[in-house]
Image: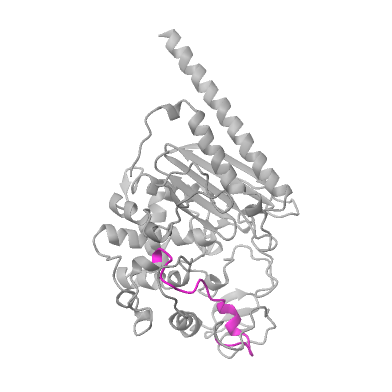
Amino acid sequence: MRVLLLLLLWNVSLHAQDTLALADSIRAVLEEGIAGGAFPGAQVLVWHKGEPLVHVTAGYHTYENRRPTRPDDVYDLASVTKTSSALLVLMQQYGEHRLNLDAPLGILFEELKQTDKQQIPLRSVLAHRAGLLPWVPYWQTTLRGEARYPWRKGWEATRTNDRRFRWATIRADSSARFPIRLTDDMWLHRKYRQRHIYRAIRKSPLKPPGEYAYSGLLFYLLPGYVERTTGTDYRQYLRDNFYDPLGATTLGYRPLDRGIPLDRIVPTEVDTFFRMDTLHGVVHDEGAAMMDGVSANAGLFSSAEDLAKLYQMLLNGGIYQGRRYLTEEAIREFTRYQYPEEGNRRGLGFDKPLLEYDAATSSVAEAASPASFGHSGYTGTFVWVDPEYDLLYVFLSNRVHPSRERGAIYSLSIRPRIHTLLYSFINRSEVASEPRRSRR
């Protein structure tokens, strides 16, 4: 008995040493990214088999090196919002047999009735192969002299904010007609969403389906869809059905309104073309900002741990701490390859590994299984789970600080290199010698 106890303690000690070595290796990659200008600071949280493995922080909130990165910092998740907000409601409805993924958009979205998009199946849009325009720079339509839409003659893509705004778009002071704050001296008209954003989506040019083209347009319409189909305020529905029961207290929209201190929120870009301010505690994405910070395209903020709770639930097949949130069937359907015969790697909303690995373009490790899934965010965020390895990987940074032009996070392959370290660690560990559990 004593020998067995000594062997157990020895194994625990070796595992602890290996874990420390893993943390050091991750920290070295993060510090290389900081030195290379990829981001002023970043953090990595890893859970394995539902338990925390490492949580590594490095650098500072900005290049002024005043506030060190801390484990409970809150980040603008950017497009990680796409798989962490309204998509959860679609998964819930599908699991309850209340949503047909092949239903045409005109039935599901009143904004798209009587348009060239009304017959497009929802599945096709969520897999990013429906021919929708990738994005629309809505903010530029506020400028006098600019064409109404970027596909019209007279559009000047390089224009910056000269404060010559069209009537009923932006004013310098707030009022009942201009209640949406963009900055202290920029207030958006209360009907801008309906008159300009939704109209632009309806009128946007459409290509034939089949070619993979990442698009966020439909995600601007999803909050309204959730409210129509649930009869509940969009943000409240997410809080009541997902975030609060998970204990994900920092996960949500408009963090300052929820009492999260500003010094705990990591700043993103120094905006030199629209809001002309450092974006701190407000959403980075311009379209989401014009949705009053609340969109299914972008807008969520979270700490690493709270984001991990949500994705651990997905990794668990819809269960977290004994409560079921989603059915296994729904998670399986949304996270599988949808159109691999077209060379499309996407699930429904979720990103997936490349069908054929290419180190130059992959955002995940070569070892990531075909069952794995996740999403990345423009601000430098990333979350990925792998059911075959019971592995959860959260990467948070503000790579757009001070400018979105910084691309070293990509050229240095920061995130896939760290991901590769995780698989190497698991494959070396004694735990990996046990049969791997697969929910697929």
Identify the image quadrant of the C terminus.
Answer: top left
- Main SS of the magenta part reads loop
Q: Is residue 284 visible?
A: yes
Q: Residue at x 57, y 68 (%)?
A: 285
Is 61 situated above or below 280? above
User: Which residues are the magenta region?
Assistant: 126-148
Residue 161 at what x, y percent from top left? 67, 80
- State the count of labels: 0
Q: Is residue 243 magenta?
A: no
Q: Viewed as shown, does residue 250 lie left or right of 317?
A: right
Q: Identify the residue at the far top of this view.
A: 2
The image's colouring method is one colour
In the displayed image of the protein, which residue is found farthest to the right? 64
Residue 144 painted magenta: yes
Which percent across, then down, holds residue 272?
Answer: 70, 71
Q: Nearer the viewer, residue 239 or 95?
A: 95
Q: Quadrant of the N terminus?
A: top left
Of residues 279 and 120, the one nearer the viewer is 120
**Quadrant of res 179:** bottom right
x and y, in percent, of residue 233 in the image: 38, 69
Residue 242 in picture, x, y percent from top left: 38, 55
282 left or right of 385?
right
In the displayed structure, would residue 344 be above or below residue 166? above
Residue 248 visible in the displayed image: no
Q: Residue at image x 39%, y 73%?
A: 224
Q: Nearer the viewer, residue 12 or 410?
A: 410
